[in-house]
Image (tube, rainbow, N blue to C red):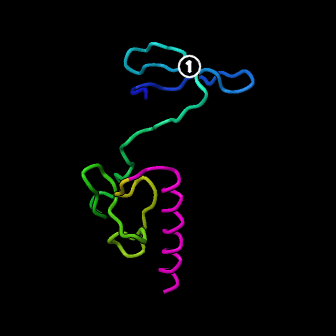
Amino acid sequence: MLWNHAARAFLREDRLRTLRVENQKTGEVSELPTDGIFIFIGMIPRTDLLKGIVPLDEWGCVTTDEAMRTNVPGLFAAGDIRVKDFRQITTAVADGTIAALAAQKYLRS
């Protein structure tokens, strides 16, 4: 893992071969041989607009139930802004499906 680095170029021939990165603290640019990458964009959820509206944990994540419902009727949260143990694209997609189905059920009732 490279902390405080930004990807600047993905260099390839027949496939990805090299990643060019910049250290955000020093400005140093380096190239790393690679077969693949996983970009991690941060840990702070963008939930400022929900402060005072729904419960947030100490990290700023939204508290929901298993159907992605918040404590505000008709307001659902899904994906990496939720309080949960794992944050991966697969769990976020599943959350979105659950939230959409729960919202549909809410709107029908």
Residue at the spot of label 1: 20
Outermost residue on the right side: it is 14
Furthest toward the bottom, the residue is: 109
Any magenta on residue 91?
yes
Above or below for 71 versus 30: below
Foreground pick, 86 / 28:
86
Which residue sits at x=52%, y=51%? Answer: 89
Residue 49, position as x, y percentages in the image:
36, 55
The residue that appears at 54% across and 18% down in the rendered structure is: 32
Residue 3 position, x and y percent, is 39, 27
Tell whether 90 sits left or right of 74.
Answer: right
Q: Residue at x 66, y 26 (%)?
A: 16
In this rendering, would 38 be left or right of 59?
right
Horizontal side of residue 73 vs 21, given as left or right: left
Residue drawn at x 34%, y 59% is: 62
Q: Residue furthest left?
A: 58
Image position of 63 with respect to 35: above or below = below
Number of numbered discs visible in the structure rendering: 1
> Could you say which quadrant of the image residue 34 lies in?
top right
Q: Which residues are magenta?
A: 86-109
List x then y, in percent, for residue 99: 48, 68
Q: In x, y percent, where is residue 77?
A: 42, 63
* Amino acid at the residue labelled 1: Arg
Element type at mark 1: strand
Dot 1: within a 10 Å radius of its alpha carbon, few (fewer than 14), some, or many (20 or more) residues? some
What secondary structure characterizes most of the magenta part? helix
For this view, does 33 lie left or right of residue 40? Answer: right
| Most foreground residue, 99 or 87 | 87
Quarter in which the N terminus is drawn:
top left
